[in-house]
Amino acid sequence: MVLHNGLERETELLGLLQKVERVLLPVIAQAGVVNKASFEIEKDGRGDFEGAVISLNVDGRTLRLRLEIEAASHRDFRYAALMIPQRISEFRKHAKRFDERMETLRIKVQERIVRAGHGMRLISFDMEPLDVRQAFHWNEQCLEARVETLDPTLKPAIVPLRSYTYRRFAASVALLERRQRGRSAMATQLAKQGAVLEVGPLTEALIARPSQTLPSVAA
């Protein structure tokens, strides 16, 4: 089953996705992947509409591949059909060492986030999508930590941190920590004061009345 996640329903895009499915699904099935789990396509959050991430469940592990859909479509996805089985084979060959590397880093990153505190927490830790044209290497694959923090409006937000080593992850967490410390303190102080952080329809109506002043509306 193919799931089209996080993609706008434009006719042009759906046509390309259907072509991706038609060309690549038999190739992936032949590699022994599709019948064991799902083959998912989602929008590449780091690119525009033509970028997509294909997620494959390979023996219980997730292999994430980045595909430039528009560029690939000019060649009828032929290179993608050739590259994907190679990436699956490389992923399987080095799965054990990659798992060990991932778990070691995940534990260290999670411990660093716990020490940082201020409400931050690790949501997920996975491989960063790999360009389908690049070979998979267990020790050189970029990783992605998704961390829950507070955004400038003091609402929960997920921040992706991408790196290869714990040292760089720790440096990124330190930057988040400094920002989160101030936002967390502000959120705590406002909560003590019973502050409402969102403007609802009633407040909007009060603000729109000419006779109202900002202090009276705030009160």
Image: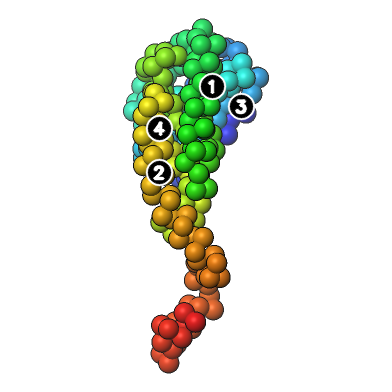
For disc 1, the marked residue is 103
**Which amino acid type is shown beneath numbered disc 2?**
Leu
Residue drawn 43% across and 51% down? 181
Residue 170, label in figure: 4
**Dots 4, 2 in contact, CB < 8 A:** no
Residue topped by disc 3 = 38
Residue type highlighted by circle 1:
Glu
> In whole angstroms, how far apart are the C-alphas of marks 1 and 4?
16 Å
Describe the colour scheme in one phrase. Answer: rainbow
Q: How far apart are marks 1 and 2 (CA)?
A: 22 Å
Q: Position of residue 77 (x, y in %)?
A: 41, 22
Q: Do the residues labelled 2 and 3 touch (CB within 8 Å)?
A: no
Which residue does the image show at 47% across and 54% down from the upper left?
184
Q: Position of residue 143 (x, y in %)?
A: 44, 26
Q: In this view, does 171 lie above or below 149?
A: above
Q: Are marks 1 and 2 in contact (CB under 8 Å)?
A: no
Q: In the rendered image, which residue does mark 2 sit on?
A: 176
Q: Where is residue 9 in the image (x, y as percent from the top left)?
A: 49, 45
| Secondary structure of the residue carrying numbered label 2 | helix
Closer to the chain start, of discs 1 and 2, is: 1
Mark 4, other Cα within 10 Å: few <14 / some 14–19 / many ≥20: some
Query: Is 159 rendered above or below residue 204?
Result: above
Question: Image quadrant of residue 66?
Answer: top left
Regarding residue 88, the answer to whether it shows in the image is no
